Image (cartoon, helix red, strand yellow):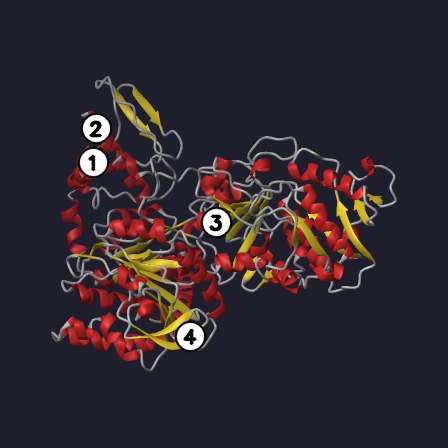
């Protein structure tokens, strides 16, 4: 039977089944357990007490609950029989459709009315600590850590854009000492919140009613506070823990316990550091981690604000190769968002998708289900998925500790070939070696495929790790599959480590990763390629390349996995402003804007609605700026929900160029949709602008937050006084700042506003032609 929360589930389910089947219901008055739990026949359930009984005549057909998840009841065919329900039935789905009828039976509105003025509920959030008997049964019902309450309060403040709530906290009176310690810790972290403990003169059922009046609810792993949130008639946010039961309860299916619009909150500590775990499809996860740490010479598993972990403290996952069924548990067990999961195939399409003897095909279904982006060396059009993308795959290569700048080499040139001939690159190496052996060029030939080409002294056979590279000025390197965009392997990266100049046949976009002077390129035309190789051999000094940039890119730039992950997961913070009524705009932001990494760090701000649209817009920007002040970043991004892309290539270039100037102190604000007067000052491709009159999107430095806040407040005050918006609306009034402070825009215009209905102007608008031609102004 259990306590109040459990009894409510059982009674509501019973009544709902009776309504659905048109039969009467009865409730045993006694408790069918040994626990000393209260019953509520004189209080909460007094209006259905006449439905209780102590015994029943005749046989009873018992229906047993089928697992913790919701299971629809079978229809009662013979209504002359007696039936009993046995179980907890902890899902709202058992009674949701009949909720109003059940509450009417209880005379719920009448019962709760005496408590509606107990507290200032409009400004109050309930918070529940469930301790009590949980102390001795934590393998079944764990006590929630303080991290859960901190995470829930953090989310509450962001979701409501309000940090001065009254927190009405609930607990059992005997737990006061434990709860006081937690409350003191919360008070220290949230000085603007006011913490008030529930009046313990109220019975538990009365306390639950008080929960239902609160504006929002932070519940514990307890059916008591679950009901306090569920019976809340406000448009409330409900926050619940991602840990409900302990390990001794097994893996229960909780999908039907929580409502879809409730917010799951992690019980783990959230730190500023990103903790990444590798999931490997062809080696153990631990081996994969150690290999990458060795490649990049990362001693303590830390890179900037990233920590690479081998335990279960991870916040992000990186898949290398296939996502195996065994490794999916690391996603599902922690409910990791797909935004925090990326992957790299390790092979091009031909190896990883098409079944072949050399590589197991990947699980395309699971990758589409769990992963935000999966980079493959050559994505075929046959993969109809936005998750799969062409990209460099950061395959293992020789360790950073072997990096050399040595340019005086003992030998001129080398090549490696295996015995394989299945792929075009495999076969072409053999063709090329046959042609080389017809010449007198002293090109050394390594690999287990070299010996089938005879006993020539130039054939060196099997080799140690860097033997074909470190003593050679040039190395001929040919990828297994040569007609890809990004399938770049150790065949060329080992050259960079050894400061050996590559003569390369492979990925089309190798220069994009390692610089324009990273290699000399072969074509696959044996006649032309032999001509180039011969010329390089005979005139080696003429073909010398400085590989400093390639070495930098390999370990610190575009070819460095730690640097890639740092940029991938450290997106600029800020907000996108969206009215609740504009679901179309929300869909636009999610599908068309946040598909780009640059915008993935933005959180939704529920736009403030005002009869005067321009006032609501100004208030929304003001609140976003005030929320940014509570963060600890160098700069922030704020956009409105009608921001749209006009030129994707320009945007991608902007994102790259912003990385080069983001720490330049010359700019204060960068506007994404410029409409003003271009000035002479420049920072690369960024130009200064005055009289800019759009706030559709802008990046703002921390030191400018209060300056712009004060400006917006002054403008809003004038609007309240009836001054025309052409003078004091936010996109007009901030012009006052633009002579003194440095506003810039990107000269290759990439963004505009949706051609759409304006909630402010009450008409369809189109300003994009003006944005595109900004450089003419």
* SS type, badge 2: helix
Labels 1, 3: front one: 1
- Residue 364: % across, % down: 50, 36
Is residue 80 something one can see in this rendering?
yes
Question: Alpha-carbon distance for marks 2 and 1?
Answer: 8 Å
Q: Mark 4 points at which residue?
A: 682
Q: From the viewer's perspective, is 115 left or right of 594?
A: left
Question: Alpha-carbon distance for marks 4 and 1?
Answer: 66 Å
* SS type, badge 3: helix
- Residue 479: % across, % down: 66, 44
* Circle nearer the N terminus (3, 4): 3
The residue drawn where x is 21% and y is 52% is 581
Q: How crowded is mark 2: few (under 14 residues within 10 Å), some or many (20 or more)?
A: some
Is residue 163 something one can see in this rendering?
no
Q: Residues within 10 Å of mark 3 (few under 14, many from 20)?
A: few
Question: Alpha-carbon distance for marks 3 and 2?
Answer: 40 Å
Q: Residues within 10 Å of mark 1 (few under 14, many from 20)?
A: some
User: Does the CB distance between marks 2 and 4 fall below 8 Å?
Assistant: no
- Residue 716: % across, % down: 20, 73
Near-viewer residue (269 or 592): 592
Question: Alpha-carbon distance for marks 2 and 4?
Answer: 72 Å
Q: From the viewer's perspective, is 507 left or right of 214?
A: right
Q: Relative to 146, does residue 110 appear above or below in the rendering?
A: above
Near-viewer residue (765 or 109): 765
Which residue is at the far left? Answer: 722
Checking the image for residue 136, the label placed there is 3
């Amino acid at each position: 039977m259990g306590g109040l929360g459990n009894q409510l589930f059982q009674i509501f389910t019973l009544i709902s089944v009776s309504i659905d089947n048109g039969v009467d219901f009865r409730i045993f008055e006694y408790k069918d357990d040994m626990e000393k739990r209260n019953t509520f026949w004189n209080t909460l359930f007094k209006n259905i007490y006449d439905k209780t009984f102590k015994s029943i005549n005749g046989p009873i057909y018992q229906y047993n609950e089928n697992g913790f998840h919701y299971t629809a009841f079978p229809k009662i065919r013979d209504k002359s029989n007696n039936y009993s329900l046995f179980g907890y039935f902890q899902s709202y789905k058992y009674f949701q459709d009949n909720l109003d009828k059940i509450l009417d039976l209880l005379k719920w509105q009448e019962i709760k009315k005496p408590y509606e003025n107990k507290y200032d509920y409009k400004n109050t959030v309930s918070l529940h600590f469930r301790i009590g008997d949980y102390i001795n049964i934590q393998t079944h019902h764990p006590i929630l850590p303080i991290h859960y309450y901190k995470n829930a309060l953090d989310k509450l403040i962001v979701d409501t854009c309000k940090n001065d709530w009254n927190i009405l906290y609930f607990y059992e009176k005997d737990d006061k000492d434990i709860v006081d310690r937690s409350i003191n810790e919360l008070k220290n972290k949230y000085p603007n919140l006011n913490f008030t403990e529930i009046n313990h003169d109220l019975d538990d059922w009365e306390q639950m009613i008080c929960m239902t009046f609160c504006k929002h609810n932070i519940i514990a792993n307890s059916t008591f506070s679950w009901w306090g949130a569920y019976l809340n008639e406000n448009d409330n946010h409900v926050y619940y823990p991602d840990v409900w039961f302990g390990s001794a309860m097994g893996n229960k299916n909780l999908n039907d316990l929580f409502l879809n619009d409730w917010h799951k909150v992690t019980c783990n500590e959230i730190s500023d550091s990103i903790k990444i775990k590798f999931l490997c499809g062809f080696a153990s996860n631990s081996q994969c981690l150690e290999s990458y740490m060795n490649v990049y010479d990362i001693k303590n598993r830390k890179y900037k604000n990233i920590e690479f972990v081998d335990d279960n403290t991870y916040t992000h996952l990186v898949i290398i190769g296939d996502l195996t069924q065994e490794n999916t548990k690391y996603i599902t067990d922690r409910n990791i968002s797909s935004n925090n999961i990326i992957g790299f195939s390790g092979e091009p399409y031909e190896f990883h998708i098409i079944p072949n003897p050399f590589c197991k095909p990947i699980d395309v279904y699971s990758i589409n289900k769990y992963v935000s982006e999966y980079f493959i060396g050559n994505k075929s059009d046959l993969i109809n998925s936005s998750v799969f993308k062409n990209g460099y795959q950061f395959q293992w290569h020789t360790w950073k500790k072997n990096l050399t700048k040595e340019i005086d080499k003992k030998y001129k040139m080398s090549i490696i070939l295996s015995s394989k001939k299945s792929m075009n690159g495999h076969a072409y190496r053999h063709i090329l070696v046959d042609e080389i052996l017809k010449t007198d060029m002293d090109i050394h030939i390594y690999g287990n495929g070299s010996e089938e080409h005879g006993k020539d002294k130039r054939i060196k056979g099997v080799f140690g790790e860097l033997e074909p590279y470190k003593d050679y000025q040039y190395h001929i390197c040919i990828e297994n599959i040569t007609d890809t965009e990004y399938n770049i392997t150790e065949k060329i990266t080992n050259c960079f480590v050894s400061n050996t100049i590559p003569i390369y046949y492979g990925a089309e976009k190798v220069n994009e990763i390692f610089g324009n002077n990273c290699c000399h390129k072969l074509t696959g035309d044996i006649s032309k390629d032999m001509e180039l190789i011969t010329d390089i051999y005979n005139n080696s000094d003429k073909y010398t390349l400085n590989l400093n940039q390639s070495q930098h890119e390999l370990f610190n730039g575009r070819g460095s996995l730690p640097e890639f992950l740092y940029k991938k997961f450290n997106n600029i913070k800020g907000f996108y402003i969206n009215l609740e009524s504009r679901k179309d705009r929300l869909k636009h932001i999610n599908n068309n804007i946040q598909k780009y990494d640059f915008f993935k760090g933005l959180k939704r701000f529920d736009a403030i609605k005002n009869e005067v649209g321009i006032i609501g817009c100004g208030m929304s920007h003001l609140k976003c700026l005030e929320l940014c002040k509570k963060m600890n970043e160098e700069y922030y991004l704020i956009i409105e929900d009608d921001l749209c892309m006009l030129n994707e290539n320009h945007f991608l270039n902007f994102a790259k160029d912003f990385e080069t100037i983001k720490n330049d102190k010359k700019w204060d604000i960068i506007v994404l949709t410029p409409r003003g007067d271009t000035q002479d000052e420049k920072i690369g491709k960024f130009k200064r602008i005055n009289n800019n009159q759009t706030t559709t999107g802008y990046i703002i430095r921390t030191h400018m937050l209060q300056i712009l806040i004060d400006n917006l407040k002054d403008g809003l005050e004038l609007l309240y006084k009836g001054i025309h918006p052409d003078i004091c609306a936010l996109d007009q009034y901030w012009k006052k700042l633009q002579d003194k402070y440095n506003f810039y825009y990107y000269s290759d215009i990439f963004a505009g506003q949706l051609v759409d209905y304006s909630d402010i102007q009450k008409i369809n608008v189109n300003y994009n032609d003006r944005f595109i031609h900004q450089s003419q102004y």
